[in-house]
Image (cartoon, rainbow, N blue to C red):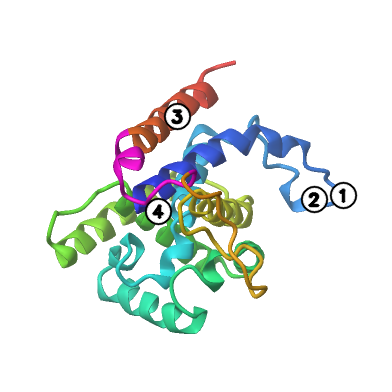
Amino acid sequence: MMGHSHSLSGAVVWLGVAPGLAALPAVVAPELASVTTNMLSPTELIAGALVCAGAAMLPDLDHPSATIAQTFGPVTYWLSKGVNVISGGHRHATHSLLFAILMGLGTYFLADNYPIGRDVIVVLMIGLSLRAIGIGVPGKTLTSAVVNVFLTAGVFATFLLLGVGYAWLGLAIAVGCLTHIFGDCLTEHGCPVLWPIKGRWVLPYKIGFKTGRAFEQKVLAPALSLAVVALLCLRLMPA
């Protein structure tokens, strides 16, 4: 799937599962007991959607030519080059269940113990989500990165002023990564979901769609965009 499809699907899934968080057993995850639709402010709900949309780009950090590598210019490009080497190339380690779990747990630990680290994660996710939906200057990678930095800073500052809490951050990261992996399993190449165990999860021949082709651009992406708008209206509508 292309970057904007991944990002939109991450937002859709987050907005869709947010109400179900109230059903999580407090005994299993007491830190998430307060993360319910009724307790989330409208700004927190939107922040969660942006973060999850950004996290849905993370598995492609193994692809130096992907949208994620262009988000903050040379910084994300060279980070992507490094991850590509360490993970074994595109659609290997980062496209697995293990990666999603580790990212979620790692983010939860970081957010719970290091506020600065938490803020860095949030800023990165906002930047990724904004870049994925096409904010930037066509053909100008560095200029797009600068525009993204300023817009990301503005969004993050707004969240600070409105007192957004991030108890849900680790969960949003894990959900976003899982959404990406599931989406790529629907394409013709599939994903090594159980990495390091060999084998890819992929739909039978001629069922999985081809990345970037007409179906994704003319059907899937518009449908996901409409779903985001519809779910936002539903979640933010006064009871």
**Within-10-Å neighbours for mark 3: few <14, some 14–19, many 20+:** some
User: Which of the two discs, 4 and 1, labels the residue nearer the N terminus?
Assistant: 1
SS for callout 4: helix
Q: Looking at the rendered structure, which numbered label has been put on residue 27?
A: 1
Marked residue nearer the N-terminal end (3 or 2): 2
- Distance CA(mark 1)–CA(mark 3): 33 Å
Question: Residue beneath label 4, please?
Answer: 126
**191 sits left or right of 141 in the view:** right
* Marks 1 & 3, CB-CB < 8 Å contact: no
**Where residue 12 sits: x, y (%)?**
50, 37
Question: 98 or 143, which lies in front?
Answer: 98
Residue with the mark numbered 3: 227
Earlier along the polypeptide chain: callout 2 or callout 4?
A: 2
Q: Quadrant of the C terminus?
A: top right
Tell me the CA gap for discs 4 and 3.
Answer: 20 Å
Whole-percent x, y for residue 197 in the image: 67, 73
The residue drawn where x is 66% and y is 63% is 101
Q: Which residue appears at 24% of the width and 49% of the height? A: 135
Q: Nearer the viewer, mark 4 or mark 3?
A: 3
Q: Point out the residue furthest to the front here.
A: 205
Residue 230 higher or lower than 105, as above or below: above
Instruction: Work out whether mark 4 precedes mark 3 in sequence or the reverse, and give the earlier one.
Output: 4
Which residue in the protein does label 2 denote? Answer: 30
- What kind of residue is marked 4? Ile
Query: In the drawing, what numbered circle is on residue 216?
Result: none
Q: Position of residue 157 (x, y in %)?
A: 37, 52
Q: Amino acid at mark 1?
A: Val
Q: Which residues are magenta?
A: 207-218
